[in-house]
Amino acid sequence: MLWLALGPFHAMESQVLVIRIKIPNSGAVDWTVHSGPQLLFRDVLDVIGQVLPEATTTAFEYEDEDGDRITVRSDEEMKAMLSYYYSTVMEQQVNGQLIEPLQIFPRACKPPGERNIHGLKVNTRAGPSQHGSPAVSDSLPSNSLKKSSAELKKILANGQMNEQDIRYRDTLGHGNGGTVYKAYHVPSGKILAVKTLNFLCLKVILLDITLELQKQIMSELEILYKCDSSYIIGFYGAFFVENRISICTEFMDGGSLDVYRKIPEHVLGRIAIAVVKGLTYLWSLKILHRDVKPSNMLVNTRGQVKLCDFGVSTQLVNSIAKTYVGTNAYMAPERISGEQYGIHSDVWSLGISFMEIQKNQGSLMPLQLLQCIVDEDSPVLPVGEFSEPFVHFITQCMRKQPKERPAPEDLMGSDKVQHYHHSLLNGPKGHPFIMQFNDGNSAVVSMWVCRALEERRSQQGSP
């Protein structure tokens, strides 16, 4: 089961949490807490006891997204309430809404007069909180993220990952608004990849994080939660600490393809199968990756190949999109030109990624590349240096017109009639370069990864 979790926060300099204790017929008392995530159930009852000394309170309630009252009677239920509240705050921030205090309703209490003790601020007026962030006019790129918010709230309330159980080891890389670490999870003994992004849960969000990064975080969490495929990076959970959110995924000990030299075609073919299957799976969920590139293709010593980094992914709306996000060096012509684009733009990125890997020269300079992609013919690999099936595979993926490119299911083979023809293609059974390696032999990739890692270690150890 996939889940998110709320880890403990450390104390913050300014107000971290405002709990509004609702008193029947007497307004409310606002309680400012500077270490909200460390708050215990007994702490809340003690304050309620001071606000309502004539009543015996053994529990309190809060309202969920449907307006239903949820009772809190223990520390575990307290954590679930805080987790739900912080996820609500995330949604309010992304949508540019004011942040409301956490409202709780004491059980079985008699309403006394208004009180002001221990720095509590009396608030008897209905209306928005004064602790919220300013309104933001921008909106999410699709309704999918908004629709997923309720689902994310439920996930946030059920997790068990926290920073106390994480031992950070090495830095694996940077990008897309965060840093990725190799880490050890003490309870399970697992090695993880932990992507940490700066995020602010309760302060004014625009001081620390852009709206675009908020969208990317929400997108990545949604997609990681939804995906259940052996070709997509595995997701263990996430937690908040201070102004950071950490996303825990499986660790791929072979790293990303951008750090490897030219890959033998019999290995690359099997890697391509996994990448195509991963894209096909995403498309089945109506998800467009939008940042397909070698650094987002991971391998391990077991011979597995998986896609990662969905920070700029989006769900498809009528199979087209207009936003300009991703890595320029791998963008399809229609995206660079600002035109509508769809799933075939991922196929272009797939083709140029494998071309770059085999030519072993890295991407062109941005200005050169943008001009080449938009104004010139697509680059072509020489047949003498590479096999004819591989050259044709790259050529098909990098057709200038999107509809002339194959979709992943066409590359793998499908029952539908294909929309492109070539003497190398064998009906609807898929592309020769892909199909000749579609034997499920992960040992080929495994041996290559192990050999490459050993060579790298020996080179690093040499004087």
Image (cartoon, grey):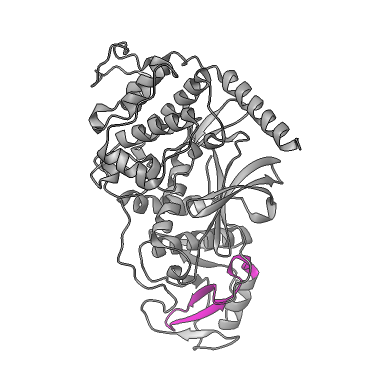
Taking the image as drawn, is residue 321 in sight? yes
Q: What residue is shown at x 41% (from left), y 45% (from top)?
A: 365
Residue 232, position as x, y percentages in the image? 49, 35
Can I make out residue 326 in this image? no
* Count of marks overlaid on the render: 0
Against 409, residue 123 (above or below) is below
Q: Residue at x 43, y 69 (%)?
A: 206
Residue 427: horizontal and vertical position, in percent? 29, 12
Is 333 or 155 nearer to us in this picture? 333
Q: Position of residue 203 (x, y in %)?
A: 49, 71
Residue 29 belongs to the span the image colors magenta: yes
Residue 194 point in image, percent of width and height:
59, 48
Which residue occupies the foreground of this view, 155 or 15? 15
Residue at 32%, 30% (x, y): give it: 398
- Frontmost residue, 327 versus 160: 327
61 relative to 350, above or below? below
Residue at x 27% of width, y 32% of height: 377
Q: State the residue in front, 17 or 362.
A: 362
Reply above or below: 19 against 170: below
Q: Quadrant of residue 129?
A: bottom left
Q: Quadrant of residue 444?
A: top right
- 209 magenta-colored: no
Residue interval drawn in magenta? 14-42
Quadrant of the rendering where the C terminus is positioned? top right
